Image (cartoon, rainbow, N blue to C red):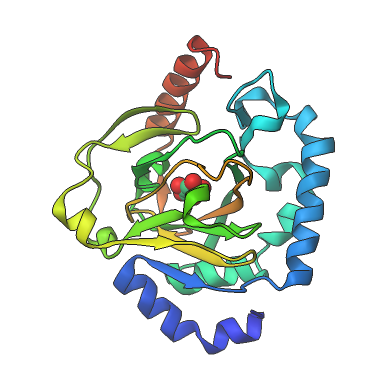
Amino acid sequence: MTNEELTKHSERLNHEFNLDGYVSIPAFFSAEELAEINENKERFIRDVVPTMPESEVYYDDKSDLSTLKQLQLMWKYDSFFDNLMAPDSKLSQLAEICLEDKARKVNMQYFNKSPNSNTPTPPHQDGYFFHLIPNNAITIWVALQDVEPEQGCVNYVQGSHKYGMRAHGSSGTLGFSQTILDFGLPYDMENAKAFPCKAGHLIAHHSLTTHWASGNTSGDKARQAMGAIYYGDSCVENKRSKANYQAQLDASLAAQGKL
Ligand SMILES: O=C(O)CCC(=O)C(=O)O
């Protein structure tokens, strides 16, 4: 999809985002664009990851580099990923269409479920981690390879962004430390939608949308994706609450030997 096509479909995309709490755009990135992203992802893992602080690089098993699970703030370390999120980029334009606000670039993440990891992504709302007033942010998730349900595709609860922030508690999962405590209510089950994706397919959710992914049980395939987070520029971040939360999290991860 091009910037021009995004403009053409902006009303529909905004409507769907407001109604469902997410949008789904197959083939958002062409095969050529995706090949370039994947080449740069490989280069980043090879050359940049060794220079990053441990708190921004998560492994399922720190002693096995093939179990790389998550990277944070890729835009900060690399101009390719910075450009991918730039104000004139397709990702930024989509964020502005959905948020009805200027988009503030916050994070670019890599999410992998390696073939043997089988670690689920617990049900959560991203806004719980963001500490924003009001909670108006978007996470854009792009499949870097075909993702079938058994590899751990993302699931959304359609319309869940309309019902505010739910109670969260410790999940014990590295990279997704919190989980919704009462997840599994009839509303969740009746409105759950799974999103298997072909490579280049983009899905994007509001910061109050309940979502999760199962573990990778495929046995032989990874599950690689890229996540771009933008805040609505009018939102204010409660920096003190965020810093307290992060310090507690880092201490707990370090104590468990996970950082
Ligand atoms: O990749 C996943 O398993 C989940 C990603 C996610 O929860 C997010 O992007 O907010």
Q: Quadrant of residue 171?
A: top left
User: What is the quadrant of the C terminus in the image?
Assistant: top right
The image shows residue 236 at horizontal and vertical percentages of 41, 49
The image shows residue 148 at horizontal and vertical percentages of 52, 57
Is 141 placed left or right of 157 in the picture? Answer: right
Q: Nearer the viewer, residue 60 or 142?
A: 60
Residue at the front extreme? 219
Residue at the left extreme? 186
The image shows residue 231 at horizontal and vertical percentages of 48, 55
User: What residue is drawn where x is 49% and y is 28%?
Assistant: 174
User: What residue is drawn where x is 66% and y is 57%?
Assistant: 144
Is 109 placed left or right of 82 in the picture? Answer: left
Residue 163 showing in the rendered view: no
Q: Nearer the viewer, residue 46 or 4?
A: 46
Residue 44 vs 55, above or below: the answer is below
Residue 247 showing in the rendered view: yes
The image shows residue 69 at horizontal and vertical percentages of 60, 36
Residue 5 vs 124, above or below: the answer is below
Q: Quadrant of residue 19?
A: bottom left
Q: Nearer the viewer, residue 119 or 53?
A: 119
User: What residue is drawn where x is 55% and y is 89%?
Assistant: 8
Q: Count how many numbered circles sit on residues in the image.
A: 0
Q: Quadrant of residue 80?
A: bottom right
Residue 254 vs 2, above or below: the answer is above
User: What residue is drawn where x is 22% and y is 38%?
Assistant: 167
